[in-house]
Image (cartoon, rainbow, N blue to C red):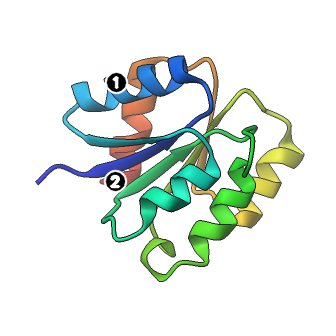
Amino acid sequence: MSKVILTVDDSASVRQMVGFTLRDAGYEVIEAVDGQDALAKVDNQELNMVITDLNMPNLDGIGLIRALRALASCKFIPIIMLTTESQSEKKLEGKAAGATGWIVKPFKPEQLIAVVKKVLG
């Protein structure tokens, strides 16, 4: 059974590129448009990983990570931030919230797959 990855980004083009890259590598992808949408889709869904943007309407990436970490089913799954933000204080805030890793946009598809494979083992 393929691993399921939830991708969360308010940009349709980013969701499309991330989704295509992951599906091409054999992963199952669920897409969400923001943190609120992601939380609605997490319900009763077996996830192996979450890749989320930081700056989104309704619920940003940090808020989403905190909410996911509060759920028993998401306490230990890897969560990667995929964002244009690269300041160390943002990274520290992400890490404090429970982010596993950080990828700065724009990204190369092979870079994303390498991180996913490394984290998922």
Label 1 amino acid? Answer: Thr
Identify which residue is drawn at 61% across, 78% down: 70
Residue at figure coordinates x 37%, y 29% from the top left: 19
Separation (CA) of disc 2 from disc 1: 16 Å
On screen, residue 106 versus residue 31, left or right, reads right
Residue 73 relative to residue 8: left or right = left
Residue that mark 2 sits on = 120
Vertical relation: 69 (above or below) 15:
below
Secondary structure state at the residue bearing disc 1: helix
Q: Position of residue 121 (x, y in %)?
A: 30, 54
Q: Nearer the viewer, mark 2 or mark 1?
A: 1
Residue kind at label 2, given as amino acid type: Leu
What residue is shown at x 37% (from left), y 32% (from top)?
113
Q: Nearer the viewer, residue 22 or 115?
A: 22
Is residue 110 in view from this perspective?
A: yes
Disc sitting over residue 38 in the figure: none
| Residue 98 in view | no
Instruction: Locate residue 43: give its quadrant.
Output: bottom left
Residue under numbered circle 1? 21
